[in-house]
């Protein structure tokens, strides 16, 4: 971060919400005055999902894992092989006593699938 008097401070982002980012300073204090510019260097830390994906790809590439035998791959792309239907079976969804206002039938079905015991639920679309 560079301030109006060319004073520079380095920091690490700790959280972000919308257009606001919280930055932990590496050393020093925030100077008084107007912030002139912010320079971002590098990528954010990977999420746990990204780390798991990277590890799976790495293990496949070095021959320690077989992608076709991965339980994630089986459940997602070959559900019929492991005895799962690729469509939502309404009879196996948990009963919801109250339906959230404004959800259509398809959205209610998706919501019930998410709170059910299916290991993977993919929902595409928005809740407008």
Image (cartoon, rainbow, N blue to C red):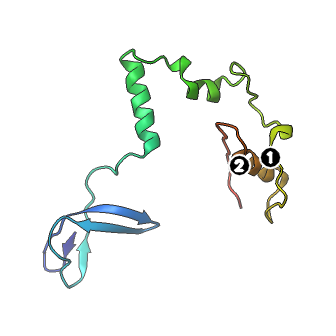
Residue 118 figure quarter: top right
State which quarter of the image contains the N terminus: bottom left
Residue drawn 80% across the image and 64% down it = 102
Residue 55: x, y in percent?
39, 30
Residue 74 appears left or right of 38: right
What label sits on residue 51 in the rendered view?
Answer: none
Residue drawn 13% across the image and 75% down it = 6
Residue 66: x, y in percent?
48, 16
Question: What kind of element bears circle 2?
Answer: helix
Q: How many marks?
A: 2
Q: Residue furthest top?
A: 63
Residue 97 figure quarter: bottom right
How would you rate the neighbour count of disc 1 (Cα within 10 Å): few for under 14, some for 14-19, many for 20 or more?
Answer: some
Residues at marks 2 and 1 touching, judged by CB atoms closer than 8 Å: yes
Nearer-N-terminus badge (2/1): 1
Q: CA distance from mark 2 to mark 1?
A: 7 Å
**Residue position marked by numbered label 2 in the rendering:** 115
Tell which of 34 and 104 is nearer to you: 104
Residue 72 appears left or right of 32: right
Residue 45 appears left or right of 9: right
Question: What kind of element bears circle 1?
Answer: loop
Residue drawn 76% across the image and 49% down it = 112
State which quarter of the image contains the C terminus: bottom right
How would you rate the neighbour count of disc 2 (Cα within 10 Å): few for under 14, some for 14-19, many for 20 or more?
Answer: few
Residue drawn 25% across the image and 70% down it = 37
**Residue position marked by numbered label 1 in the rendering:** 94
């Amino acid at each position: 971060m560079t301030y109006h008097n060319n004073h520079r401070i380095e920091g690490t982002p700790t959280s972000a919400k919308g257009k606001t980012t919280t930055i932990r300073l590496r050393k020093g204090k925030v100077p008084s005055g107007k912030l002139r510019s912010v320079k971002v260097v590098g990528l954010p830390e990977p999420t746990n999902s990204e780390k798991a994906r990277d590890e799976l790809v790495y293990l496949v590439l070095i021959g320690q894992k077989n992608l076709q035998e991965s339980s994630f791959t089986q459940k997602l792309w070959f559900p019929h092989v492991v005895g799962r239907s690729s469509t939502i079976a309404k009879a196996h969804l948990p009963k919801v006593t109250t339906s959230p206002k404004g959800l259509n039938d398809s959205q209610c079905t998706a919501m019930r699938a998410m709170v059910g015991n299916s290991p993977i639920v993919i929902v595409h679309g928005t809740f407008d």
